[in-house]
Image: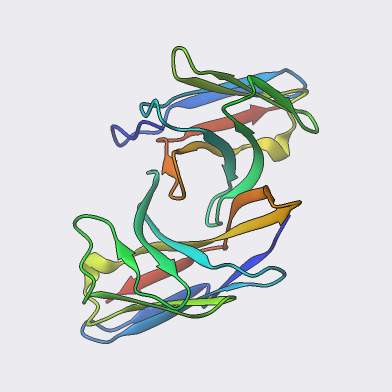
Amino acid sequence: GAVVSQHPSWVICKSGTSVKIECRSLDFQATTMFWYRQFPKQSLMLMATSNEGSKATYEQGVEKDKFLINHASLTLSTLTVTSAHPEDSSFYICSARDQRLAGGMISTDTQYFGPGTRLTVL
Amino acid sequence: GESVGLHLPTLSVQEGDNSIINCAYSNSASDYFIWYKQESGKGPQFIIDIRSNMDKRQGQRVTVLLNKTVKHLSLQIAATQPGDSAVYFCADSAGVALNFGKGTSLLVTP
């Protein structure tokens, strides 16, 4: 399957600082990437859809000024948690959509996930 | 999938037995379904997918069954191994974004 990387894998920061998390598709181009948040023993919650070259689409209840998303290229999306607070501590996971065409029809349309980033805000 | 509650259901199976993990979804417009495996501290790993024009799809040791009438999805793992221990999530999509189920914790005992 396709490979998606995230950096850093974990980060500890002080309250009030900003943290940037990178998501890269390593062997395919992704016009669409997604950012999720996951609390312990819970499912993944979609935060936003990141589209290359345009503004991200945020899910209801997710503050766009708090969680800045930039999708500057077909292989890179970044999530910046601004003015982080302890309640922002969580496991953040990105995914990249691998969509390929064959003969004018969609042959592959799968989301592949990164390994996640553990954010701890003190 | 349906995401309700905070506690993951757990399925305990003996090594070598077959496992069946079930999932219900609510959106009748969903036409794409995926099963993911997530080990502790890692991101979800793609296992198998199925589109709504099929009701069964097989992979290596895994089979996904789709019943659109009752909006039910299942993942069957043959000859379960200790390395299969993880949390399994189903996800459904009616377009681009995935809707994740609450997950099932699979514990394989020797």
Residue B50 lies, in percent from the top left, at: 63, 32
Q: Residue at x 39, y 25 (%)?
A: B28
In this picture, is A47 found above or below B38?
Answer: below
In this rendering, position of residue A121 left or right of residue B60: left
* Applied colour scheme: rainbow
Q: Looking at the rendering, in which quadrant would you find the C terminus of chain A?
A: bottom left
- Residue A56 location, quadrant: bottom left
- Residue furthest out toward the bottom: A17
Q: Report if residue A56 is visible in the image.
A: yes
In this rendering, position of residue A13 left or right of residue A6: left
Q: Looking at the rendering, in which quadrant would you find the N terminus of chain A?
A: bottom right
- Residue B86 location, quadrant: top right
Q: Residue at x 54, y 36 (%)?
A: B32
In this rendering, position of residue A75 left or right of residue A14: right
The one of A108 and A117 positioned closer to us in this rendering: A108
Q: Residue at x 36, y 26 (%)?
A: B26
The one of A15 and B67 positioned closer to us in this rendering: B67
Residue B53 lies, in percent from the top left, at: 61, 25
In this picture, is B43 found above or below A52?
Answer: above
The one of A107 and B3 positioned closer to us in this rendering: A107
